[in-house]
Amino acid sequence: MLGEGIVKGMAETARNFLGSYVKEDRLTTVQYPEERLPQKEAARNFPFLVYDGDDWQAGMRCVACQICEKECPPQCIYITKSKDKKPDHAGKAQLYPAIFDIDISVCMSCQICVEVCPFDAIKMDTEFELSTGDRFGDLLQHKNDLSKPNTYFRKLHPTEAAEADARLAAEKAKAEAKAKADAEAKAKAAAAPKPLAAALAPALAK
């Protein structure tokens, strides 16, 4: 029949239009900002720095290796390495970023910085309400703006955070086991009987 396709198309349009008022799965309009859809776990926007514990300066995972700065395609990460070392969250002396800035007006949210970081120190945030009237000031974020606790990371990306925590825990256990083995080896060497020549050396010296 002539025009049958048009009639079917209009019927489908009418069904979707009317259904959008009564069917929950078709209620696609959200009255933002009063209503908000939950972010997907895989959502990403701009990077942030992860720290452990309660003190963001002591717990910062970043050791200023500058890999992310070198690999960043738009070159929006700026890092200055510290001249000294300070104890991290686990008590190990580490270098740290004296300056760590990200220009989010340039960042393209590619996540390459996250992929290349060997310390799980930088991750992607889902925050997107970052509009400001100061384009050059407020969009250049410093390390105190970027630093967020591991609990925040767990809330945003629980699956990835669990994998990172397990990996870091395994590395920590391995390092502790190595340190313990080294200490035991030194103690065993110190307790071992001295060679005869070494034992007689004091007597022969007289």
Image (cartoon, rainbow, N blue to C red):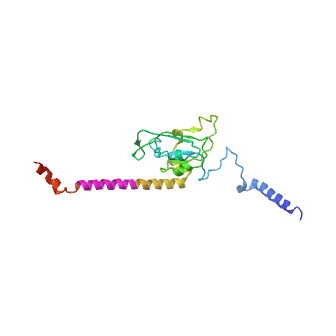
- Image location (x, y in percent) of residue 71: 54, 47
Q: Residue furthest toward the left?
A: 206
Residues in magenta, as a range:
174-190
Residue 181 belongs to the span the image colors magenta: yes
Quarter of the image for the N terminus: give it. bottom right
178, 13: nearer the viewer: 178
107, 158: nearer the viewer: 107
Specify whether 176 is left or right of 129: left
- Image location (x, y in percent) of residue 76: 57, 42
* Visible residue check, residue 19: yes
Specify whether 134 is left or right of 185: right
81, 204: nearer the viewer: 204
Residue 154 belongs to the span the image colors magenta: no
Q: How many labels does the image show?
A: 0
Q: Residue furthest toward the bottom?
A: 1
Quarter holding residue 170 = bottom left
